[in-house]
């Protein structure tokens, strides 16, 4: 389960030889890695996205925006002044904001030149209302999602498709966008360096990524082979 869209995750899944399901795009996409096709996806209405963006800018001034296009081959389009949080990820820079809306999108990514991520996310939640769901998934990554869509949405659909029971699920995470997933899963584990909001709802906190925090929990539950 990841906030990244399926096209950005697909190369990694291919390299690892994964053929199962991946919940992508903050839960808006369920991608079948073996068949290289989208089982399910929800798009963010572009008019609503543009309206939400206008409401946010009316409160905080200009923000720099990017979008993830829908589909297994969708591109990430970024405005001239938008800086990618992860520079190694592929993106196409456009000349004008209007070009962001050229194709169906799964989400909008926002950055502000002065506000912190927490401040930008809080303001966005206060003004967009039911136009979109606001998430924060990492440094420099405040996003607008289709209203009501979270990681829990995609996880529930993937579990149903696979015939898995909710009571047999474990979720790991580190940012506030993982909160709905923790609330859905039977057991939520926050990483040691996780955002305080996620730690507050976690069932337990494990060690850091560098100390193999995920493996520590899995070995405790399932043992080692």
Image (cartoon, rainbow, N blue to C red):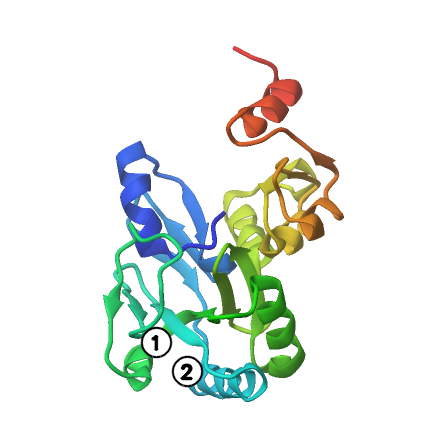
Which numbered tag is attached to residue 182? Answer: none
Q: Nearer the viewer, residue 83 or 78?
A: 83
In the depicted structure, whether residue 68 falls above or below residue 36: below
* Residue for point 33% across, 40% down: 13
Give the image quarter of residue 127: bottom right
> Tags 1 and 2 in contact by the CB under 8 Å rule?
yes
- Can residue 7 be seen here? The reply is yes
Q: How many marks can you see?
A: 2
In the depicted structure, whether residue 194 falls above or below residue 98: above
Q: Residues within 10 Å of mark 1 (few under 14, many from 20)?
A: some
Q: Which residue is mark 2?
A: 46
What x and y, as percent, mark residue 33?
Answer: 33, 45
Q: CA distance from mark 1 to mark 2?
A: 7 Å
Q: Residues within 10 Å of mark 2 (few under 14, many from 20)?
A: some
- Farthest top residue in view: 225
Q: Which residue is mark 1?
A: 104
Q: In what element is the residue under mark 1?
A: loop
């Amino acid at each position: 389960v990841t906030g990244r869209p399926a096209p950005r995750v697909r190369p990694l899944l291919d390299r690892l030889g994964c053929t199962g399901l991946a919940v992508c795009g903050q839960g808006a996409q369920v991608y079948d890695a073996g068949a290289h096709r989208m089982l399910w996806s929800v798009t963010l209405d572009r008019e609503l996205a543009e309206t939400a963006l206008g409401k946010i800018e009316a409160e905080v001034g200009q923000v720099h925006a990017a979008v993830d296009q829908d589909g297994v081959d969708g591109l990430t389009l970024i405005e001239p002044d938008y800086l990618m949080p992860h520079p190694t990820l592929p993106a196409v820079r456009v000349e004008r904001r209007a070009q962001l809306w050229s194709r169906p999108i799964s989400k909008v990514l926002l950055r502000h030149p002065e506000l912190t991520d927490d401040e930008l996310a809080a303001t966005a939640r206060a003004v967009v209302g039911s136009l979109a769901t606001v998430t924060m998934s990492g440094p420099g990554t405040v996003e607008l999602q289709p209203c009501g869509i979270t990681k829990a949405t995609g996880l529930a659909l993937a579990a149903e498709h696979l015939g898995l029971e909710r009571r047999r699920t474990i979720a790991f995470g580190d940012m506030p966008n993982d909160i709905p997933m923790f609330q859905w899963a039977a057991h939520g584990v926050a990483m040691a360096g996780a955002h305080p909001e996620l730690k507050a709802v976690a069932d337990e906190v494990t060690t850091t990524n560098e100390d193999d925090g995920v493996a520590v929990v899995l070995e405790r539950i399932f043992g080692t082979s």
